[in-house]
Image: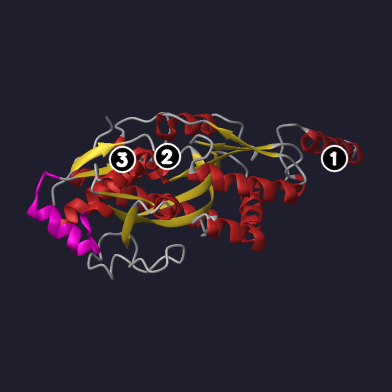
Amino acid sequence: MDTRFGRRRALAGLGMALASPGIVRADTFPSSRVTLVVPFPPGASTDTTMRVMADKLGQIWSQPVIVDNKGGGNGIIAAEAVKSARPDGYTLLATSSMTHAGNPVLYDKLPYDPIKDFEPVTRMSLVPMCVLVTKKLGIRTLAELTARLKAEPGKHNYGAGAISASVAGELYKMLAGVDAVYVGYKNNQLAAPDLNNGIITFMICDVGSAKMILTSGWADALAITQTEPFPALPGVPSAVQAGMPDLLFTTWSAFYAPKGTPREIVLKLNKDIIAAGTAPEIAAKLDSMAGGPSFTTPDGLMEFTKSEIEAWRKVVRAANIKIE
């Protein structure tokens, strides 16, 4: 056999393989448009922060980065779409804890597996929630709210505009040993007027929504659901400071790619997303929106996702929460 011919044939085969549209190389990625699939409608907090990231990533990559809103089904529609996308890094799920921690616990069956069907890229934010109370009752502390609810069981309502908010509300009720009637809303903003009017006594929502409601002067903030105060809401006590150290519940956002996306592409995405989110002007924007960066490695996001599923499971089972 002519070894020179054999080498030429091998090199030609390698060249064809590299030129194949099915092969994605990290050193040339991305060479065309990248799509961030967001499982919420335009204007939602996750959508807003992801649009900030999309603009910066477009600058870094010199390629268009678009946000594709696939709302509905508690994120199931969006997650399933990304699960079925080509695993080449050009379609990413830009999501929240709902798809990858809440749904796996709340639904008996899902058309996707949060661990087996995705390649974790990086967490983007880790944000606590805030306990808000109507101004109508003159309640100033979490202890006062608990005392009022205990003194008047079943006579007070609490609202939630997202499943994560209702789970956080149930966690508070369990820890405080109080009774309150749940009132559901399509989003936290729709719950705010009822909080202002005293139709609902309290609600627990993400910090971004809480900032908007507090700016309207419609409520008072009693506690942040983490161990330390949160800079975006200065003066609001942490759960520890408010006397309920186990009232810990966070919302978060993250990027996932379809299962099978090459490791080198996942690592490139991780590096570039972190670069985008830590750019001074972007970090400042995210902080102002109460979505400050909290990035991880891909492996770190995998372990975090698993731990969050268990954290949700503990509360959901204890409170017997079910999807209506």
Q: CA distance from mark 1 to mark 3?
A: 51 Å
| Quarter residue 35 falls in | top right
Mark 2 is on which residue type? Thr
Identify the element where label 2 is drawn: helix
Q: Position of residue 210 (x, y in %)?
A: 40, 53
Q: Amino acid at mark 1?
A: Leu
Is 295 placed above or below 316 here?
A: below
Q: Return the disc, 1 or 3, that comes first in the chain's sequence.
A: 1
The label nearer to you, 1 versus 3, is 3
Q: Residue at x 25, y 38 (%)?
A: 183
Q: Residue 128 in magenta?
A: no
Quadrant assignment, res 139: bottom left
Question: Disc 1, disc 3: CB below 8 Å?
Answer: no
Q: Which residue is mark 1?
A: 11
Note whether 260 is above or below 277 in the view shown.
Answer: above
* Quarter residue 190 falls in: top left
Q: Residue at x 26, y 67 (%)?
A: 242
Label 1: few (<14), some (14–19) or many (≥20) C-alpha neighbours in 10 Å:
few
- Crowding at label 2, few (<14), some or many (≥20) Cα neighbours within 10 Å? many
Where residue 226 appears, as percent x and y from the top left, is 34, 63
Marking on residue 258: none
At a point 42% along the width and 65% down the height, the residue shown is 230
Residues in magenta, as a range: 137-155
- Return the disc, 2 or 3, that comes first in the chain's sequence: 2
The figure's colour scheme reads: secondary structure
Eyeballing the image, is 35 above or below 274? above
Tell me the quarter of the image containing the N terminus.
top right
Q: Which residue is mark 3?
A: 105
Above/below status of 294 relative to 260: below
- Name the residue type under label 3: Val
What distance separates the C-alpha of mark 2 from that of mark 1? 45 Å
